[in-house]
Image (spheres, rainbow, N blue to C red):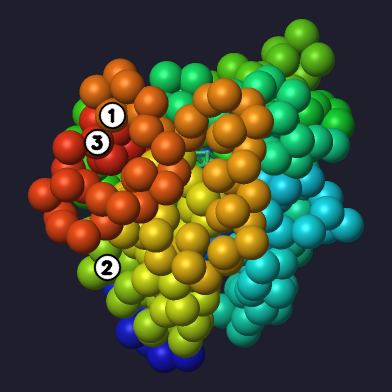
Amino acid sequence: MNKEKLVELAERLAIPLPKEMPSLESYDEIHFNFSGGKDSIALALLMIYGYKVSKHKVKLCHFRVDGNDEQPAYFDYPETDEYLRYCADHEAFNLPLVVISSPKGLKERIEDRGKFPSAQTQFCTSYQKRDVYAKWVRSLGPGNYLCLSGERSEESSRRSKNLAKATFRVYSAANAPTKNRFVDWYRPIHHLTVNEVWKLMEYAGIEPHPCYTEYNVSRCSCKFCIFLSPNEMKANAEKFPEQFKDLVEMEKRLGHTMKFEKGKPITLEEYIARASTNENQLTFDFFEKPCVDW
Ligand code: SF4
């Protein structure tokens, strides 16, 4: 780790916090939403080395989409559990890691509902992440809690518009003033470029999650995320053929496809057949939308 360069960059990127936001010192606990993706790592580095958040207040919080760790990785990458421990124990962090999950994994949730999540009905995020976090914070009892998540304006026009409206707000899914539980939500890396994100990681000496190097996806999302491009979906279909076959079977069984093009269903096999050109990929309405805004 090059601590001098890391601190210099993180301090430069630590812009003033929103005026309406209480001071960082006023929170009892600060929860970093930690997927293991590059943005979640940049968030943690910025807060520790730029804003000098006291480490004893911090928890790295990961939401395991497939349910608890007794359930095999299906939407999660198989390397994620180990990678999270590597990050938590890394000399740049040495932070407690909390892995929380819904009793039902995403696959079971899809089977129950008889349909896949979509951009319009993103129940994967709401059930497997937002509700899981809200329930966990409620279990902590009274206190002042701050949840931080790593969205960046540069990622998409939709995200940029959302972030332009507000980067800070009360986290209403878990906030309960009558129970003396106050939960806020802030998005501290909204202004970072992807270059700055990678630089922070480089100076910290943190290796990227294997999804970037082994699977060549642009985001550390679910490995069969509803927002993957045809190229990314095809690459993961080839890396995980049994699970992809299973998803194809699931589409047939449920009579519902994961993907739609201009309102018409398109099967996963048809979708990955579009992987040949960039032009084809851009015809999908929701290609721009990452896992969002829980
Ligand atoms: S990464 Fe994609 S599939 Fe997974 S929870 Fe987020 S939007 Fe849903």
Real-space Cα separation, disc 3 to disc 1, in angstroms: 6 Å
Q: Nearer the viewer, residue 193 or 212?
A: 212
Rendered image: mark on residue 41: none
Q: Secondary structure at mark 2?
A: helix
Q: Amino acid at mark 1?
A: Glu
Q: Which residue is mark 2?
A: 196
Q: As rendered, which of 29 and 81 lies closer to the eye?
A: 81
**For the residue labelled by badge 3, is the local secondary structure a helix, a strand or a loop?**
loop
Residue at the disc numbered 1: 261
Mark 3 neighbour density, 10 Å: few (under 14) some (14–19) many (20 or more): some
Task: Between label 2 and label 3, give the one nearer the viewer.
Answer: 3
Element class at badge 1: strand
Residue sitting at x 71%, y 67%: 81
- Between 262 and 54, the residue placed more toward the observer is 262
* Separation (CA) of disc 2 from disc 3: 29 Å
Determine contact: label 1, label 2, CB under 8 Å: no
Image position of 255 with respect to 43: above or below: above
Mark 1 residue crowding within 10 angstroms, few (<14) / some (14–19) / many (20+)? few
Q: Quadrant of residue 74?
A: bottom right
- Amino acid type at circle 3 is Phe
Q: With 158 as the anchor, is 200 left or right in this view?
A: right
* Nearer the camera: disc 1 or disc 2: 1
Residue hosting label 3: 284
Q: Give the vertical position of 133 relative to 254 (above or below).
A: below
Instruction: Tell me the residue at 42%/37% (across/down).
Output: 267
Give the image location of residue 162, x and y in percent: 30, 28
In the picture, residue 174 is in which quadrant?
A: top right
Q: Is residue 188 left or right of residue 143?
A: left
Where residue 200 sits in the image (x, y, percent)? 37, 74
